[in-house]
Amino acid sequence: MIAAIKPSGANTRGLLAYLYGPGRHDEHTDPHVVAGFAMLAMPDPGRDENATLTQLARYLDEPVRLRNSEFGKKITDHVWHCPVRAAPEDRHLSDAEWGEIAQRIVAAAGIAPEGDDLACRWIAVRHADDHIHILATTVREDGRRPKLHDSGIRVGDACRQIEKDYGLRRLKKGDRTGTRAPSRAEMHKAQRLGWEQTSREWLQDRIRAAIPHSRTAEELLAYLEADGIKVKARRGPSGDLLGYAAGRPGDLNKDGEQVFHPGGKIAPDLTLPKLRDRLEACQPEEHPTARRNRPATPWHHATEALDSFRTDLADDTHAQAHITALGELLEATAQKAPTHLRAELQSASKAFARAQRSQIRAEDRAARAIRNAARDIVHTATGPDGSALAALIAALLWAGIIASRWHEAKGHAHQADAARQTLHHLQAAAEQALAPTLVVLEQRQPREETRRTLAHDVRAAVPDQADRILTDPSWPALAALLADAEARGHQPHQLLKEAAAQRELATARQPARVLITRLQHTSRNPTPNPRAEAARRRSPFTGAQTPTDTASSRQSAVPTPPASQQHRR
């Protein structure tokens, strides 16, 4: 059940005309009052043919009129409007049930607390099976104003209890971090103009897409303007940026003027202070020596930056920072990914936007590495090779799993649900990204004898998951990759042990595929087996050995690849 509080100005009669009218988009059927203040004295134009809307409006506005006549400053914002709608799958509620629900909501809001005879005047009008409209005038019988601060939270809590008591669809409790739902007017305007999204939804996507491209708030606004978005900056006398609002081209009001939306109304985490904290938390330009020590490409850099994701979630403020930065990395990856992967990655990025926001304040500097990796990706001129992209998407998938588990542990229901939606899209993208590699590997699978030897390595290195790995349809491709790694001087047993140790395999649907992705990243800059390298130099063959030639010539020791080369799922 959803109750949406909407302050509606001072025209009680105008709102009543809508509630009792035919409806502008949805047909209004049999409008009538199901509950209200002092029902016996209240005229109901829906049930009494002699009652008029003007009479009902005067009855509701009487305390307002009396207060305005006694005080010099008139009240002009006294109309309180709250539509309450049941879910489509909910059962049909009777007038009596809707009346009880309305009474509980006005009590929770502070409009008419239970047992308060001097509360505000209100009515609940029903003109459809699935919803009612509560209209109140916010001046009490004693002339005081009601205490409506945080009424939305209290009404939301009341709705959750009503769902439980009446056996209705149970919704998740709000936490004040969600975006404001599009109004009916916004949705109708978008439909009229042929837009798939309302202006605020469209602007949110564009601003999130611009964040990885910017290092300061000023750069962000300049990027948005260059992208054709209307921007209105609010500055102090010194010229310092104090706030901003953004507008969608073509979104005009009735006077033909551009409509602007403040950043905080577009999304709670897109206010200027929060954007400034994120954008300016990145580390300064690196020293050339540090830059030389970076991985070969931004894609590899991003994969390795995610290696700290699990360990840095121990502190809540660091965890929130890493999850926010993960959203930026998802957005950057979606922008630069090949066309055939872009749709799934964009859907993942959009779904994860809700998982980025919680009531925990982020220590943004803790996630510099991930945020810098996102910026490196959007500024790179070349796309990734197949294995690098597959490794990054697999790392993003695992980071998304960790984020989902963290939100679940913290009781963040909306964020955990958004993270789970993200995982569906990332899983599909990961399978698409790895598919070409699997085809190539399966065409080069080693001989049966070599596969048996490699299977022994699997059982020795990963005994708990060996049966699942060896029966995975991608086992032949994994065997080919292990044989290739051995040809480069690695020990398959050691590589498998290290790859499996990165994180658990028990929850992986296809463990062989997971190991392929990890091994590709681990052996990107392999640390060779010195004995194998010496044997290869002594070989009479000038070309590189094939996997089948080298699989039987095992060496007993291999240095462990450095931690910077270890890869996550």
Image (cartoon, rainbow, N blue to C red):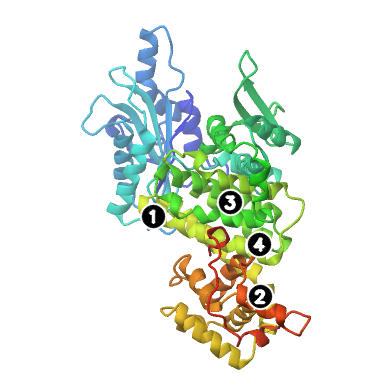
Decide if residue 222 is on the left or right side of residue 140: right
Q: 157 above or below 512?
A: above
Q: Residue at label 2? A: 533
- Badge 1 density bin: few <14, some 14–19, many ≥20, Cα 10 Å: some
Q: Is residue 260 visible?
A: no
Determine the CA span between mark 1 and mark 3.
20 Å
Comes first in the chain, label 4 or label 3: 3
Q: Residue at label 3? A: 350
Determine the CA span between mark 2 and mark 4.
29 Å
Q: Residue at x 63, y 60 (%)?
A: 344
Comes first in the chain, label 1 or label 3: 3
Q: Secondary structure at mark 4?
A: helix
Determine the CA span between mark 1 and mark 4.
28 Å
Decide if residue 306 is on the left or right side of residue 196: left
Comes first in the chain, label 2 or label 4: 4
Comes first in the chain, label 1 or label 4: 4
Q: Residue at label 4? A: 389
